[in-house]
Amino acid sequence: MCFLCEQSNPVRHVDTFRDFEGVVREKLDGRKYVCEACLAEYGEALGMLDPKKAEKLKEDLKHAKNEITKLTERVAELEPYEAIIKKAAAPKPKTAAKA
Ligand SMILES: [Zn+2]
């Protein structure tokens, strides 16, 4: 049971290696554990990142890096055409009017 939220959820718990002994016998007596949900909630309050959010951000970063690689390759494929396009778009030199 989590010492903070007093729930017995089927999630991971951290053993604080500390014991609690109340004045009267109660359900929290004994070893103090803290559940994963409380750790995430209180950790976030201190500016720490929820492990699930961190994992999602790592996946997003991996996809973004793959996208950068694909786009970099595409730029390299198209670079030779850049000079041709610039030349075609450049204003034509004026020719003398014919009489
Ligand atoms: Zn809890």
Image (cartoon, rainbow, N blue to C red):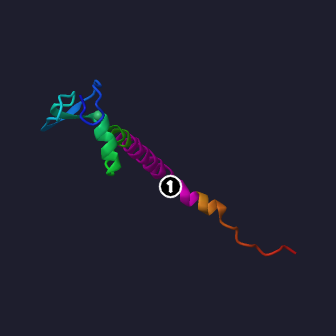
> What is the three-letter code of the residue carrying label 1?
Pro
Q: Nearer the viewer, residue 11 or 28?
A: 28
Residue occupying image coordinates x 25% and y 32%: 2
Q: Nearer the viewer, residue 16 or 91?
A: 16
Q: Is residue 52 above or below residue 82?
A: above
Instruction: Assign the N terminus to one quadrant of the image.
Output: top left
Question: Seen in the image, is 77 located left or right of residue 51?
Answer: right
Residue occupying image coordinates x 31% and y 51%: 46
Question: Seen in the image, is 42 located left or right of residue 89?
Answer: left
Q: Quadrant of ligand 1?
A: top left
At numbered mark 1, what does the secondary structure look like: helix, strand or loop? helix
Instruction: Estimate the x, y position of residue 63 in percent, counting from the top left.
Output: 40, 41
Q: Nearer the viewer, residue 85 or 57?
A: 57
Residue under circle 1? 80
Q: Nearer the viewer, residue 80 or 1?
A: 1
- Tell me, yes or no, whether the highlighted magenta stretch contains residue 43: no
Instruction: Assign the C terminus to one quadrant of the image.
Output: bottom right
- The residues colored magenta run 58-84
Residue occupying image coordinates x 65% and y 66%: 90
Quarter occupied by residue 32? top left
